[in-house]
Image (cartoon, rainbow, N blue to C red):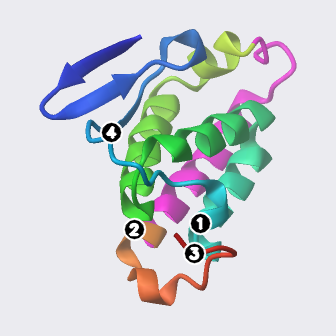
Amino acid sequence: MTRRTRGWSVFAPRGGSYIRSPSTLGHKIQMDTDYLTPLAYDCIRLANDAADALKLDLGAACSQFHTEDDDLHGIMEYVKAIGDDPEGYLDRWDLLEDADVVEFRNRIQLLHDHIAKTIKTPVSERGEPEFKL
């Protein structure tokens, strides 16, 4: 499902949660996890610590953005939504029965804090990406 809001396209991955990205996706260059700086890539590693499904969500979301900063802002919104309803996220992925919700919530908070720190860090100080655009 895609809908437009204030110049953004809103993509609904599995379960109806949303990741937002700029609506200029007609541009040929899109991000890939290979182009993330080490500090930004750590967001995917921390997502994996919370849930494998979240790692997949954030990795796939990267291709919806043109820049690392766009990606970070998009996944920040997504992680905030998960933090508001961690049980809902886990239930959509059929993980609720086996998950420790308190631990998941704590890991989501760590991920949120790391994303915020990365956004505040100038790109030139985030390390060199494995590949360049």
As drawn, which residue projects farthest toward the front? 28
- Name the kind of residue labelled 2 in the image: Ile
- How many angstroms separate mark 1 from mark 2 (CA)? 16 Å
Q: Is residue 44 above or below residue 125?
A: above
Horizontal and vertical percent position of residue 4: 21, 21
Give coordinates of residue 45: x percent, y percent: 74, 56
Amino acid type, residue under disc 4 in the picture: Gly
What stretch of residues is rendered in magenta?
A: 94-117
Give the mark nearest the N terminus, 3 or 1: 1
Say which quarter of the image contains residue 29.
bottom left
Q: Sequence order check: which comes first, mark 2 or mark 3?
A: 2
- In the picture, measured across the screen, residue 1 lies left or right of residue 14, that is left
At label 1, the amino acid type is Tyr
| Residue at the farthest right position | 98
Residue beneath disc 4: 26
Residue at the image point whose x is 74% and y is 31% from the top: 53
In three-dimensional space, the C-alpha distance between marks 1 and 4, rounded to whole angstroms, equals 19 Å
Residue 49 shows which numbered tag?
Answer: none
Q: Amino acid at mark 3?
A: Lys
Residue tagged 2:
119
Residue picked out by circle 3: 132
Q: Earlier in the sequence, mark 1 or mark 4?
A: 4
Mark 4 nearby-residue class (10 Å; few <14, some 14–19, many ≥20): few
Q: Which residue is mark 1?
A: 35
Q: Whole-Å distance between the Cαs marked 3 and 1? A: 6 Å
State left or right for residue 64 relative to residue 14: left
Q: Main secondary structure of the magenta part?
A: helix
Question: Who comes first in sequence, dot 4 or dot 3?
Answer: 4
Camera-side mark, 1 or 4: 4
Looking at marks 1 and 2 on the same chain, the residue that comes earlier in the sequence is marked by: 1
